[in-house]
Image (cartoon, grey):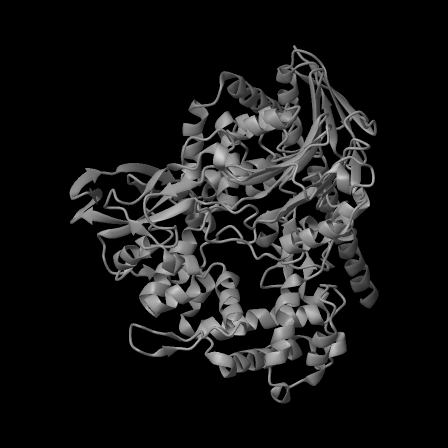
Amino acid sequence: MKNKVIKILKGLAIVLVTLLLLVGGYGYYFVHKSLPTVEGKTELKILDNSVKISRDKNGIPTIEAENDSDLYKAQGYIHAQDRLFQMDLARRQASGRLSEVVGEAALENDKKFLVFSLRKAAEESYKDYSEEAKKILENYAQGVNSFIEEAKRDNKLPYEFSLLGYSPENWTPIDSLTVGKYMAYDLGGHWDHLGFNNWILNNLGEENLKQLLPDSFSKNKDNEEIIKANQGIDVSIDKNTAKTERPPMENGSNNWVVSGKKTKSGKPLLADDPHLGLGTPSVWYQMSLSTPNNKVSGVIFPGVPGIILGHNEHIAWGVTNFGPDVQDLYIEKRQENNPYKFKYDNEYYDAKVDRYSIKVKGKDAVDFEVVNTKHGPIIDQLLKPLGNKDTSFSMQWTALESTQELEAILNIDKAKNWQEFEKSLEKFKAPAQNFVFADNEGNIAYKSNGNVPIRKKGDGNLPVPGYSSDYGWSGYVSYDKLPKLVNPEEGFIATANTETVKTDYHTSNVWAQPYRKARIDEVLSKKNNLTVDDMKKLQMDTKNLYAQEFLPNFLKNINVDKISKKEVVDKLKSWNNVDEKDEAAPLIFDLWMKKIQSYILKDKMDADVYKFMPHKESYVDKVLRDSLNGKKVNLRDSLNGKKVNLIEEKNGLQEVLTNSLNETITELEGKYGNDVSKWKWGIAHTLGFRHPLSKSSALLAYFLNPKEYPISGSKVTVQAARQNDEGLVNHGASWRFVYDFETKTGHHIVGPGQSGHFLSDNYDDQIEKWIKGEYTSESIGNIPKDKVLELVPGK
């Protein structure tokens, strides 16, 4: 009997293993068949002539076409081959259409993007594109749709579509422009800054607001009447407001260009590393485009034709986020009992209303409307005043206007010198960017472009009355007055989201912390005979100037006798201010700065308000500098007379620093134990390129998320690497690029890799390169031959 049971169990085990192998084998076959075809010949009936696609070992293609029409058709086809699911998610998110494929969890996100009206703005922008640009957009869309048709016919759509149970719709020119408008959303803003300043005014009082904002705020006489208009119009910040996803405030970049007078070769060097979200697949697609008349190489967003960053045979260029205040909030007053009429100069006008029916997977459709005032959409979905149903905020934003960035990109790709490049930039209006430039003639230059509003009154720190024509925008700073440098005496130009050139007009209230820019300037100014390797080394630099500024003064002002763990103080005193993954000091300092912010601010506001608070550093760094420089920081709550003592004189500073360091030690002991020698920055600072579908199941996370690594750097180092609350580094250099005019070679890193398919060899093959600073190289004249696909005209 026992032997019989064993035989039965063995038989069942064999059956189970066989079933698992069959299921696993089918699963592998199912996923594997959607890998793109990268060798041989493929018929594409939309082509006029054959097109050659040559990929290198990193999966990076060069497209060789005989004309522009076939070039952009092939580019659309290749983008869809490698990144169709990413492209579809991007257009759905920006259009407010995620709910119909992922369900109710995306509903609030869809409403947010319908309020931001990116697709509507793309439709308006399309009308003003040239016929040539419209043709390129159409050619690109034809290429995408040829792949969609082929993949549906051969049952080879990317596996993600099957996982979510839907098929992609055809691509349109508006989809490409909507993806472009999404980047304006991701890189331009500050509406939340205005809303939070209103909260400070109405909850901590006018004196506190003036203390926390830059000194220039108090010098602008218009702000007195703007303060009065905001008093009593208190923003509502609740759980829903606090959890509203906003672009990371660290979205920015580094770029610099060095003239031949400072390089070993006597030729310019250019470097660029845009800082965006780090995920799988990469936000960028690297490629080279070649026709007999033009050759250009670099990166572009999947879903958009052309090359946005990189080089051609004559020039090279790179960008960082300029970051002007391009979103203003207006206090709008409705006519009583009429939600669609708004006051303006003592009369009422009819708002325009956009009505949507949001499809929700597995649920009934949800009706949603966006009310548009003279200034822009009502943003109750994002932020609204308490109590008064007849008062709301509207938002004016440069990106909601008709702008033609793709026109600029296509012209930049063909520019041969600074004059042609600068002229091309004139159409690049949203998002506003800092471009650096160099050319074969040895010229270097910089230009900040984009629409920068001119305000009738105020400086963009608070909402203004939308019911009066005394407020609003009177136009934009003229293009010829935007910041610009050409061949400066210093021999280099660097930008890193700070104010690069002082202007006599208002640009922004919210700049990035100055440390990346200061470190780049420090290195470039001290050294001559610079080489490509020096550029790469600087992009990987992890010197922390934030710590260098504050830490010595912090250590002077703590009460050492009250610190619970003296070896922590010793670690900080001996630290060389380099954010090295195996060191304890970066871990301690990073958490200490967060504890200082919390200690100063958190008990002054609800948890939801503190979570919503944008740019905490910009407020707290000012308070700390004022206090360390001997300026009295004594804030009072003007609403009820209660003291809101952020820091009051030296004893207050000592208390803040000592208590917050002890809180830091307690938390680190709880997480990592009592032995300080085992504390490592890399434990709380782990690089992870996560796939958007990995949140839905542990099984998908196992297959789709690449391996994670402890890494050096931080959000304030040139090697930008910002971690979230879980310690996951999910924001940083999405692409690194160095161009050498001596050898006409571009050096690149695109993390995690080129492909969007997890079975591809190029899915995550650049992660370790990203960590180590190991670049891949390309030159326009050296076309790879590792894998060649010929696209031929079909019948």
Q: Residue drawn at (43%, 55%), measured in percent from left and top?
A: 193
Who is closer to the viewer here, 446 or 600?
446
Location of the N terminus (image quadrant): bottom right
- Across and down, in percent, residue 739 comes to 74, 37
Q: Is residue 232 above or below residue 62?
A: below
Residue 199: % across, % down: 36, 62
Q: Is residue 227 above or below residue 283?
A: below
Count of picture labels: 0
Residue furthest toward the front?
Answer: 489
Is residue 675 shown left or right of residue 327? right
Looking at the image, is 69 positioned above or below residue 505?
above
Report if residue 161 is visible in the image: no
Residue at figure coordinates x 28%, y 40% from the top left: 373
Residue 775 image position (x, y, % from top left): 78, 43
Please tell me which residue lies in front, 423 or 686: 423
Q: Nearer the viewer, residue 120 or 601?
A: 601
Q: Position of residue 765 (x, y in %)?
A: 77, 45
Residue 502 seen in this snapshot: yes
- Quick one: quadrant of the C terminus? top right
**Left or right: where does residue 211 sit relative to residue 392?**
right
* Rendering quarter of residue 485: top right
Q: Quadrant of residue 411?
A: top right
